Amino acid sequence: MFGFTLMLVVFILGYVAIALEHSIKIDKAASAIILGVLVWAVFIIGGSSILSLNFSEAWKEFLHSTAFLDFKEIHPHASLVEQIRYFIVDNQIVEHLGEISEILFFLLGAMTIVETIDQHQGFKLITDKITTTSKVKLLWILSILTFFMSAILDNLTTTIVIVTLLNKLVDDKKTRWFFASMVVIAANAGGAFSPIGDVTTIMLWIGGQVTAGNIIAMVFVPSLFNMLFPLAIVSIYLKGTFERPEENPEDSQVFTSPFERKLMLYLGVGALIFVPVFKTLTHLPPFMGMLFGLGVIWITTELIHKNKSGEDKRKLSVVGVLKKVDIPTIFFFLGILSAVAALQSAGHLALASHWLDKNVHSIYGINAAIGVLSSIVDNVPLTAGAMGMYKIMTPAMAAASQSPEYMHHFVQDGAFWELLAYAAGTGGSILIIGSAAGVAAMALEKIDFIWYMKKISWLALIGYFGGIFIYWLQELLLFHM
């Protein structure tokens, strides 16, 4: 039990170090990668005692897998320690690294595409059309734009695009932090109701728990109010105007024609929109569609700048742009997701899920808890855990159960799955590191964790629980009246 508890203690201490980044003067990426390594180190050192607790679903599945049988055939006299070492190093780390790499390459591709558009001053075409200097008006414009964009693209890509735009619109750092944080709430809300807007919704859609049309119809209104409640509150006390930043002299030196600006804006946004289309057509992971789009843009920049002088060509090529991409963000994601993966493999998440199932016999209570937990732990393994714990029921199975009314919530397009998509998608807004969108905004704008907790978390909580109330009201009006 000591090793199992120690993993959790190390995880919490690592999160505290990330949260106190500005106080301890250590970059959060450094804390994250050390956290990711240490949690796995504790796991493999105390593997025998940790797995003997029988909390790990992954270990149980492994013992009945062909991979374990193959290992036993090759190493018939392998000890339990060797079996555990093989399970952790050759099975779990490899499996989770594959999943994590999909996210990292997706993020790297999206950041490079957005940075390429920006380097060609493509976003200037959009920022020039936003003429307002009113904080409230800009907040509504950006939030609504983010909400619908994240449903078409996804919340991570949309956040990167909008925060980059924001950097061109608002000069004051703290004002920009506030706007970027509200963008995170809007992005997560917009991604929750769309089958392609958030990783967790994609998982439920592919898994057959929900259908595309139903998730849009039933989760759109709660998601909309998740954004509107905080917006309405902020609009009451947010006053004044903002100043635009002065144009960077270095940017103005880079020569781009109006044609090149338009081409890169349309091509870049088109590449981002094409990602879900590519996934639907090929059934390949989204990161491949993102890398395909990046490849097309890379070739295009090479061709249109081939006759330019060395300096301009260097700055406008993807090779030059890659030097500006925020690589520490990639390491931060790697560390955080690795640490969470270790907790998933060891059984911490499964234990939490079983506790919820045993003590909270309400779909609203279970999903509300999952959503709040997703602000601390990545929502992908939480959703995966819920999908593993609760199976899709057929109407006949639900009717034959001891509690048919409760079990009916678990049929395809049942209330449990709809509410899970909402909660897992929007609960991450409560903390800045609770969602991919939040982590991206934090990295791009260097938003302080404690500042976000003081200024934004309470707004996100109101939006989150307000959306759950709206869903309950919607269910009441549609099915119980």
Image (spheres, rainbow, N blue to C red):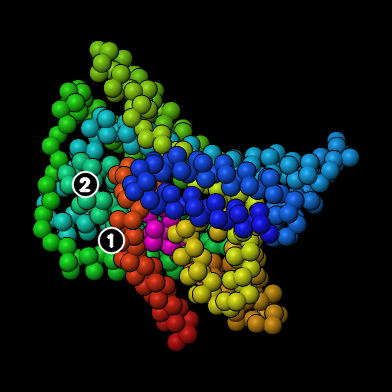
The residue drawn where x is 43% and y is 49% is 17
Compared across the picture, whether 71 is left or right of 33 comes to right
Q: Position of residue 453 (x, y in %)?
A: 34, 60
Q: Position of residue 104 (x, y in %)?
A: 48, 39
- Residue 455: mark in rendering: 1
- Tell me the amino acid under the disc marked 2: Lys
Q: Which residue is mark 2?
A: 173
In the image, the segment drawn in magenta is 423-434
The residue drawn where x is 43% and y is 28% is 295
**Is 43 rendered above or below residue 363?**
above
Q: Position of residue 114 (x, y in %)?
A: 33, 37
Closer to the camera in the image, 364 or 221: 364
**For the residue carrying disc 1, how many other residues have a C-alpha within 10 Å: few (<14), some (14-19), or many (20+)?**
few
N-terminal-most mark, 1 or 2:
2
The residue drawn where x is 54% and y is 62% is 210
Q: Magenta includes 433?
A: yes
**Residue 149 shows in the view:** no
Compared across the picture, whether 212 is left or right of 269 comes to right
- Tell me the amino acid under the disc marked 1: Lys
Compared across the picture, whether 115 is left or right of 295 comes to left
The residue drawn where x is 38% and y is 65% is 223
